[in-house]
Image (cartoon, helix red, strand yellow):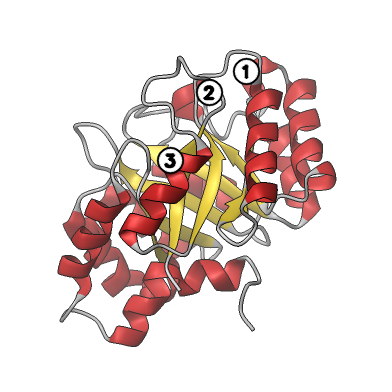
Amino acid sequence: MIIDGDVHISPTPEAPESLKVEEMIRRLDRAGIDKALTWLQPPYMRDIDKSNQYVKESAERFPDRILPFGWADPRLGVAHAIRSVHRCLDDYGFYGVKLNGAQNDFYIDDMETVRPVLDEIAASGKLLALHIGTDAFDKTHPYRLGKVAGRYPDTRILAVHMGGVGFHDLSNAAIEVAQEHDNITLIGSAVRAAPILKAVRTLGAERVCFGSDMPFELPHVEIAKYDALLDGEITPEEKALVMGGNLARLFGLEA
């Protein structure tokens, strides 16, 4: 089973590169991808509820293809973000909630505005996803990921982009932080190939997952990248974990 660990969809037609669910499914089919971890695609202003609801409705239309994941934005207010968490987890039954300090302009370990939201996600026992990239160098630094992982050691954290995105590269720092905190799993989307292989060799194949970052990248191209990167470098069994087995385990999809 191949699972894409980073896909965005949007109900907003004016969003740049806006991806509707029908086109998402077409691209998954072309790439030979079975399922996709799916969350909203910014921008959304204050209509984040509409975007999370679109993910929910899309998952109901394509239940065998979409693994729905929520999104909360502390910049809309702490109470608003906590309501988003409970709507996504309690009402919609999503697998977890993502916070993106780059897109939404906040420090992911902020004591006042973010920690109360993290507390709610951790208390739910579900997954937390964090954007870890260089497009907001300080706000989403792997150092801050380590602080979050240390505070919530029982919460499984998906580190999306593993320190990539943008002109700089913090993947080495992300790998080192993941070595220190075994509740972190790296999603290798929008990051160079060499760091992905280094992460697999350093952390083990059980801690790294394929992701395309669709629609910002093309999944059939990213699949080819991973095939070229991993074939002959790790065993077929290890590659199967990276390409979907790890997410299947985390999401409880294994038989």
Q: Mark 2 points at which residue?
A: 106
- In the image, is residue 92 above or below residue 1? above
Q: Can residue 113 be seen in this view?
A: no
Residue occupying image coordinates x 36% and y 26% = 17
Mark 1 or mark 3, which is nearer to you? 3
Q: Which of 137 and 59 is in front in this view?
A: 59
Q: Give the CA distance from mark 1 to mark 3.
A: 30 Å
Residue 88 % position (x, y)? 74, 40
Give the secondary structure at mark 2.
loop
Residue 214 horizontal side relative to residue 67, left or right:
left
Amino acid identity at mark 2: Phe
Q: Which mark is residue 75?
A: 1
Q: Nearer the viewer, residue 46 or 11?
A: 11
Residue occupying image coordinates x 57% and y 26% = 11
Residue sitting farthest toward the right: 91
- In the image, is residue 171 above or below residue 88? below
Q: Give the CA distance from mark 3 to mark 2.
A: 31 Å
Q: Give the CA distance from mark 2 to mark 1.
A: 7 Å
Give the secondary structure at mark 3.
helix
Q: Is residue 134 visible?
A: yes
Q: Nearer the viewer, residue 195 or 92?
A: 92
Circles 2 and 1: CB atoms closer than 8 Å: yes
Residue 232 % position (x, y)? 15, 81
Residue 31 % position (x, y)? 32, 58
Residue 204 % position (x, y)? 36, 76
Q: Name the residue under label 3.
A: 23
